[in-house]
Image (spheres, coloured by chain):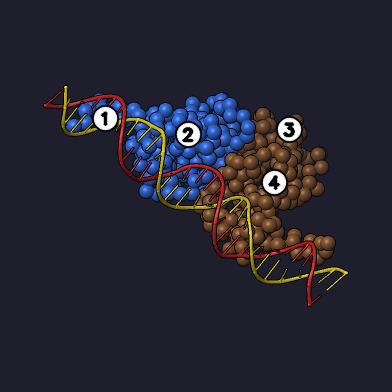
Chain colours: A brown, B blue, C yellow, D red
DNA sequence: TTAATTTTCGACTTAATATTCGAAACATAA
DNA sequence: TTATGTTTCGAATATTAAGTCGAAAATTAA
């Protein structure tokens, strides 16, 4: 008895709630992202939020799932070229860099909130963890291929991953100024730090 | 009317409480680091904790103050050699690396907890902020000197700082394995990433 | 020994915030 | 139009953890 339109409206309202949650997070930080605030921002009563989501956590998980799915689907098309691991690696990083640049607060959420919330957000079972794992796997594979071809410094690939992950994170999320990093600056960094070994 | 020994014993008990707090943090994560847990670990009643510290926050601040003081006092002796900025920079990083290696959980606390706690922990007035600021200032100065001498890539020093900060952080604190990084591995990284420009 | 001082603590209070409840408002279809 | 299903919400409840209280235990000094 639930019409198509009703379903769509439901989806739409869930969407609004998610947007409100992100907006509260962006403006007031994660600690102020209470259900009361989110409800106010979404212009719903608090109880209504629970009509659409079973818990606050479920809202957060939904954000993470959608976000990581988007990341994965953005890089997926470029990662199959295994001939030039270094170029592929940098391409993929650049894609993620663009995403971050265009939606800083979403990605701040995706990349920092799970760290701050050591509850069940981080359980392996969630979809977003799967995408994250796949992505890391791809990057690590590219690093290993690249090392085999002398396009990267010879190091334990897992440690190199951590270093690059930290570097990326530092570039975008450390420091006071939240002005997004330009593509050019980022490329400069990537090539400077990991791209100046071996050949094309 | 408070004897010397009494004062010492008080200090000692404060010490025990701080150690318990770190231990709880290490074993259960920051979210489980409640006063009840810390009290249990320290084998004191909860109220006794408040006899020695006026709040939970004060315990954390004490940890941060002592920790950052230690960091500062460890690098202070080596940073005055301004002739070889790159070497000095790497020396200082290595010193911090050794400290981290020898006390992983303390430094995880120092470097990650303030991020997770957007309360007054981060107020500029605290001693530890002063040490942190001084340290960053020194590192940035070294980077700038080093760039002037072509020992580092030419980039905006503040962004380079962020990148290196992120990289360092990634090396020590990202990933699953908490096995500390060996000095050799770390030196390898530092020189590979930031040390292979220009000359001595 | 005993009075004063210091230290300890379990039980209570408070505060913040997530979650539930039950009734009302609204929409839909017969 | 009315009966049934859907959506909304403010008020009440539950939970968690910080912080307080007043009395008791331990220590010290006379």
CA distance separating discs 4 and 3: 16 Å
Provide the residue designation for mark 1. B7
Residue B66 in the image: state x and y as whole percent: 39, 35
Q: Earlier in the sequence, mark 4 or mark 3?
A: 4
Q: Is residue A169 visible?
A: no
Q: Earlier in the sequence, mark 1 or mark 2?
A: 1
Mark 3–mark 2 CB contact (< 8 Å): no
**Do pointers 1 and 4 mark residues of a single chain?**
no
Identify the image quadrant of residue B188.
top right
Residue B175 in the image: state x and y as whole percent: 63, 34
Image quarter (top left, top right, bottom left or bottom right) of the N terminus of chain A = bottom right
Query: Left or right: where does residue A141 sit relative to residue A121?
Result: right
Chain of the residue that carries numbered disc 2 in the rendered image: B
CA distance separating discs 3 and 2: 44 Å
- For the residue pair A194 and A78, the one nearer the viewer reads as A78
Please tell me whether mark 2 sits on a helix, a strand or a loop.
Answer: helix
CA distance separating discs 1 and 3: 58 Å
Identify the image quadrant of residue A130.
top right
Q: Is residue A63 above or below residue B178?
A: below
- Crowding at dot 3, Cα within 10 Å, few <14 / some 14-19 / many 20+, comes out as many
Mark 1–mark 3 CB contact (< 8 Å): no
| Disc 1 versus disc 4: nearer the observer | 1
Mark 2–mark 4 CB contact (< 8 Å): no
């Amino acid at each position: 008895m639930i019409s198509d339109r009703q379903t769509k409206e439901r989806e739409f309202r869930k969407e609004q709630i998610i947007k409100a949650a992100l907006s509260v997070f962006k403006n007031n930080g994660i600690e102020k992202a209470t259900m009361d605030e989110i409800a106010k921002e979404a212009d719903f009563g608090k109880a209504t939020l629970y009509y659409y989501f079973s818990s606050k956590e479920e809202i957060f998980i939904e954000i993470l799932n959608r976000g990581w799915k988007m990341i994965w689907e953005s890089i997926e098309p470029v990662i199959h070229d295994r001939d030039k691991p270094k170029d592929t690696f940098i391409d993929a990083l650049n894609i993620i860099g663009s995403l971050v640049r265009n939606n800083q607060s979403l990605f701040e959420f995706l990349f920092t909130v799970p760290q701050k919330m050591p509850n069940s957000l981080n359980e392996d079972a969630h979809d977003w963890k799967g995408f994250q794992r796949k992505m890391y796997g791809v990057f690590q594979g590219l690093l290993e291929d690249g090392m085999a071809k002398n396009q990267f410094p010879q190091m334990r690939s897992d440690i190199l991953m951590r270093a690059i992950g930290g570097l990326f994170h530092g570039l975008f999320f450390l420091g006071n100024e939240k002005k997004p990093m330009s593509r050019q600056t980022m490329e400069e960094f990537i090539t400077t730090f990991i791209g100046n070994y071996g050949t094309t």
